[in-house]
Amino acid sequence: VARLLGRIRPETPVWVVALIQLAFQSELAGAVLGAARYPAGRYLAVLAVVEVLFAVLAVAAGTGLVEREAGLLVVAAAVFTGLGVGAVFVIHRRLAPEA
């Protein structure tokens, strides 16, 4: 997290912030971005989009569970997991220290 904090700047692209929000818990991402003085308006916009995405996936997974539609549950869980793992991978490559 300390290395990530050192690489975040107020001009960091919104898509990178969205990946950070996808990869980490809201509280951790918010603390890191706040400490880096990332603009609050842009952060809140990204947070809203990512939270809506999580809500849609949670509703899909819940619907699959309640209605016993294993396919819907598995797809929602796979998308959720894939987004998180993919975001961590991209962040690691994008924000890795330059050699």
Image (tube, rainbow, N blue to C red):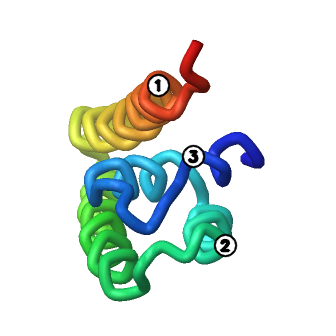
- The one of 29 and 13 positioned closer to us in this rendering: 13
Left/right of residue 1 with respect to residue 83 in the rendered view:
right
* Residue name at image x 32 percent, y 64 percent: 50
Kindly tell me whether residue 62 is visible in this rendering: no
Instruction: Quickly name the residue at label 3.
Output: 7
Q: Are marks 3 and 1 in contact (CB under 8 Å)?
A: no
* Placement of the C terminus among the 4 image quadrants: top right
Q: For marks 2 and 3, give the CA distance.
A: 12 Å
**Which numbered dot is residue 35?**
2
Q: Residues within 10 Å of mark 3 (few under 14, many from 20)?
A: some
Residue closest to the far top: 99
From the viewer's perspective, is 5 left or right of 44? right
Which mark is first along the chain, 1 or 3? 3
> Quick one: label 1 or label 2, which is nearer the N terminus?
2
In this view, the residue in front, 85 or 64, is: 85
Placement of 22 over or under 58, stated as above or below = above
Residue 91 point in image, percent of width and height:
47, 35
Dot 2 falls on a residue whose secondary structure is helix
Quick check: 79 above or below 25?
Answer: above
Q: Position of residue 12 (x, y in %)?
A: 37, 56
Q: Position of residue 83 (x, y in %)?
A: 35, 38
Question: Which label is found at residue 65?
Answer: none
Amino acid type shown at disc 2: Ala
Task: Classify residue 28 by image quadrant.
Answer: bottom right
**Amino acid found under the numbered disc labelled 1:** Phe
Residue position for label 1: 89
